[in-house]
Every structure is written in C-alpha cells, then in structure tokens.
Image: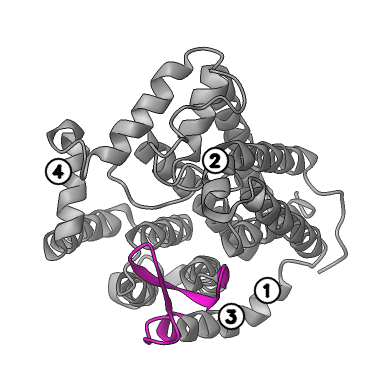
Amino acid sequence: MAKARSAPDLYLIAATLLILTIGVIMVYSASAVLAFREFGDSFYYLKRQALFAALGIGAMFFTMNVDYWVWKKYAKLILIVCFVLLVLVLIPGIGVVRGGARSWLGIGAFGIQPSEFMKMGMILFLSKWLSQEQSGITHFTKGLLPPLGLMGLAFGLIMLQPDLGTGAVMCGASLLIIYTAGARIKHLGMLALVGVAGFVGLVIAAPYRLKRITGFLDPWSDPLGTGYQIIQSLYAIGPGGLVGLGLGMSRQKYSYLPEPQTDFIFSIVSEELGFIGASTVLLLFLLLIWRGMRAAVTAPDTYGSLLAVGITGMIAVQVIINIGVVIGAFPVTGITLPLVSAGGSSLTLILASIGILLNISRYSR
C-alpha cells in the first residue's frame, strides 16, 4: 500500500483532545477532596491523570503515523499475549484484587488491566480474520461460530475475575465487527436470545449481580445498599440545572458519591457544569463517533473498515453503558467514561486506539 495520502481527520483529533482536556479538569475537580483525605495531596489524581494523558497522547501520535495494516501482521500474536495475561491475572499472588475483582497486574498504585488490552486485541484479530474470511460469515457453523467461540472464551476468562462491564464492551465491539462483516441478522437474532438467557444465568449465579438488578429497578427499596450509588448519582445530576453549581462546587464528591473520579464522573460533570456542560461532552462524543464511522465507511479496504468499526464501537458502547448507569437507565457495572474518567492503562489504550483510527482516516477514499 502507498504512503498516507492525506492529513489525519482534524475533527477527530479536535474532539479527542477537547474531551481529554475536560476529563483532566474534571478528574481534579471530582477527586481533590478524596485525594486529600486518602493521600494528603489534593493533586494526587490530577498528577496521575496528566501523566497518563501525556503518555496516551504520545501513543496516539505514534499509532497515527504507523500504517494500520502493520497491526494486521501482529494481530494473532497480540491476541495470544492478551489471553496469557488474562490467565495470569487469575492466579493468586500474581493478579491483584481491586474493587472485589482480580483484574489487575502490577505493583502498588500502578498496574494494568489485561481485560482492557483484550478489548483491543480481539478487535485487531477479528478485523484481520473476518476481512480474510468474509465470504463465509453467512454460514452459521463454519463462518459465524468460530469468531463467536473465540469471543466467548475471552468473555469467560474476563468473567472469572469477574468484570461484567469490560466483558460487555468487548462483546459489543466484537459483534459490531461481525455484523459489519456480513453476518446474517437471523443468526445474530438467535444468538441474542441465547445471550439473554446466558446473562440471566450469570445474574442468578452471583447474588451481588442480582442485587444490582433489583437495586436498579427500585433503588429506593435499599437506599443505603444496592440503590445507594444510583440515588447519589441522581442527587448530583438533579441540582445541576441548566448551568450547574460551578466548577469545583460539587456537593456529592464530599464522600456521598462513590468513585466520583472514575465510574460516576459524569454525575459530577452534570452537577458542576449543568445541562450545558453535560450536553457539550455528549456532543463531542457524538462528533468522535461520527468521524470514526466516517473513517470506517471511507477506508480503502475491508480490514481498515472493520478495524475502524471495532474501535469506534468500543468507545461508543462504553460511553452508552457509562452514561446509562449514571442516569439510572442501566444497572451499575463499573465501566468508566472514555477519555474523561481517571485511568491509567485504559486511558493510554483508548488514545492509542484512536491513533489507529486516525491513521485509517489518512487513507480516506
């Protein structure tokens, strides 16, 4: 393939950097009280976020200038490494338990989540596989079941941690790739029924998940237990009104709302910046998703199209789940808001994946 023919999508770059800037500001605003209480340093989370944002921007500009088909060559190896990491994290003494899930590898405050890397690893491999075997995807047993089986294996390992939210994002992005590759609607419909039955089974198998479902349906039935997070999130969103209470003026971050700098940071955005601020963030995400899908539609080959769909879908599904949880539309799943929530490996990985998306946009037809 020839050298890149044009500049990367400037709208996509602008949307990404604007969301990231808002995220860094809001991480400090949401975490200052918590950071001072836990570490004696109000800037603790801000410094971490700024560090990983800088690393992520470096990774984004690196992948933006690496021709995207290079990843096709290493997709299988990357997926194998991701599977090995998912197995390692389950071994006591190697995997680190945080928030009730054995999903981290690392030392002290610094670590990585193998499940986050599996999302991208699966996207890279499925894009390669289905771009080469696209004609067989309409055949249920030979074309559709193998990629679904691979996806199911990864999902099963992630659920052993357990981490339903990350597993759901990986499956959502993977299914978008499979659908775009040409899978039949009736086949996916049948599998959706099986998936619903499986989800019900997972909920029944773990009492804490069933409590989350009941807490989601009626949070005020257990306001100090399963319904606490949703109620406190709504208490943050409600007073925000049109223009918000003002940057740094959140009340819910004072030990009322759990995880204000990660899972529920959009609640703080709504409380401090109001409807206008929250809508601005959502519009920027819509711009990012639109430009990502435009890169998919105008990519010069099937691999580039599927890869762009997977990356954009990963971001879109994660945004939908996070916002849905914050406003009480979905049960609590522990999913962060891309580019906005405090994060380390997840933030760097999202920015690196956007860099791949930007490289695809350079070959727009």
Q: Earlier in the sequence, mark 2 or mark 4?
A: 2
Q: Earlier in the sequence, mark 1 or mark 3?
A: 1
Q: Earlier in the sequence, mark 2 or mark 1?
A: 2
Q: Which mark is residue 71?
A: 1
Give coordinates of residue 169: x percent, y percent: 42, 56
Q: Residues within 10 Å of mark 4 (few under 14, many from 20)?
A: some
Residue sitting at 66 percent across and 39 percent down?
19
Q: Amino acid at mark 3?
A: Ile
Q: Can you tell which of label 4 and label 3 is closer to the viewer?
A: 4
In the shown orientation, is residue 1 left or right of residue 277? right
Disc 2 and disc 1: Cα gap in Å? 42 Å
Q: In this rendering, does residue 328 appear at all?
A: no
Circle 1 — which element?
A: helix
Q: Earlier in the sequence, mark 4 or mark 3?
A: 3
Q: Which residue is mark 4?
A: 214
Q: Can you tell which of label 2 and label 1 is closer to the viewer?
A: 2
Q: Which mark is residue 78?
A: 3
Residue sitting at 64 percent across and 52 percent down?
44
In the image, is residue 148 above or below residue 273?
below
In the image, is residue 97 above or below residue 335?
below
Residues 332 and 285: in front is 332
Q: Residues within 10 Å of mark 2 (few under 14, many from 20)?
A: some
Disc 1 and disc 4: Cα gap in Å? 43 Å
In the image, is residue 290 above or below residue 62?
above
